[in-house]
Image (cartoon, helix red, strand yellow):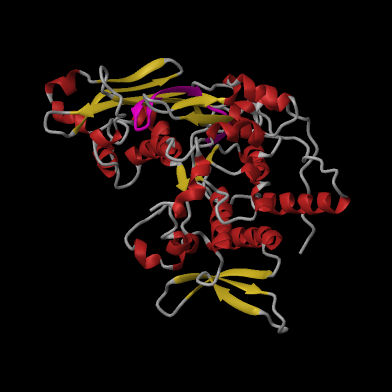
Amino acid sequence: MAEPTSLPPGPRIPRDRGARRLSRRVRAFSDSASEAVGISRTIGALGAALGSPGKIPSVPRAPKNGSSADQVTRISHLELDNWRNFRHIDLDVEGRVFLVGPNAAGKSNLLDALRFLRDLVAVGGGFRAAVDRRGGVSDIRNLAARRYPEIGVRVLLGNDSAPGQWEYALQFRQDNRRQPEIAVERVTRRGEVLLERPDQLDRADPARLGQTALEQLNLNREFRDVADFLRSIRYLHIVPQLVREPDRSVGRSNDPYGGDFLEQVANTQEQTRRSRLRRIRDALQVAVPQLQELELEHDVRGTPHLRGKYEHWRPRGKWQSEADFSDGTLRLMGLLWATMDGVGPLLLEEPELSLHPEVVRHIPQMFGRLQVRRGRQVWLSSHSPALLEDDGIGLDEVWVLLPASEGTEVRPATELEDVRQLLESGFSMADAVLPRTRPANVEQLEFFADRR
């Protein structure tokens, strides 16, 4: 196998500027020369998975007056009202977002707001289906909502040079038949209003308010770029048991939990699939040194399987299928595949699960390369000190979720003066942020077995 290359040199980025420009030097390690070489190989191999993406779906891009990565459309602003845990969120968004908070603070629910936008325009989706899938309006609405009960989701879409190129806003409520009903739908392009609902037709026929204009091809022609972008959002939280036993997810497509992961791999164009699996194999050899080959095959029933050849005491080694792969191997495979599959925002929940801390430690730099090469936005939640130790993570990339009596507050780390001071004193982001998310009296768990 060819020696993986390290990241190209680049300017150092101060923490408080985040990752607007992620071309930077790989973090220097002074503990030992051997450790530095090992870390460089890890980053290079993981980054190699982010090479040529093959054929990818088209998403809207701004006019190319800068580097291509700078011009890729992303979510530049997010506003939520009465969405599950959150009374109100109104925040600018960088190319990477790290969600940090205690259990049940709402990290998954925040990512679900973006999944909701995708479901509006997904095949087989739509407004009412997206609401029903989440239990209805009453389950989505924040429990503290009183005077203004409408649920609102608003995003700005753009790039570094034009962060507010598009605006999409949706507010909805429950009608007297307990069905979801649109209260406001608005689309603007560079400040020009293209759609404002309810309009005269809606008032004449209120049943129209059961569908967004965004999901209807006969109505969204002027702003179809918005629908195409939202459709490109991808959420991933691989459950290894579903990959091993896909029958549990029969009938599902694009299952974010991995039920049809092998089908997705099998349905990829052959040349692209082989190229991706080769890159994944090269990356996996860092974390799983015994792995020599990785390929897709079909059994006699036509069911796809991944199989890997492991170095063994016997000269020819041993072939194993996904049923034999460890949880960590399957999760890392899914993570690496997702980085190469598509160009829209990638939503990840706790990507550190089942992975060795030394692998987790370099996930942020892998996503840094993804940002540099392809401009792809990444949102992820994490409890991992190893992941948050990376000194390339900026204050404006970290959102701290703090539960309160009226719902969870979301504070960017830039607003937390004590976090800034700790970083300036040489502490890592993990040291500065994670203590804020520590449950009160967590040490009481030690005495659970003593209770009767």
Main SS of the magenta part reads strand
Left or right, 183 with reference to 122: left
Taking depth in this image into account, of 452 and 70 the one nearest to the observer is: 452
Q: Residue at x 42, y 62 (%)?
A: 242
Q: Is residue 41 above or below residue 402?
A: below
Q: Residue furthest right?
A: 33
Q: Position of residue 417 (x, y in %)?
A: 62, 19
The verdict on residue 129 being magenta is no
Q: Is residue 281 above or below residue 376?
A: below
Stretch of the chain drawn in magenta: 80-100
Q: Residue at x 78, y 47 (%)?
A: 6
Q: Is residue 336 above or below residue 167?
A: below
For the N terminus, the quadrant is bottom right
Q: Position of residue 219 (x, y in %)?
A: 28, 30
Q: Position of residue 163 (x, y in %)?
A: 53, 22
Residue 345 in sight here: no
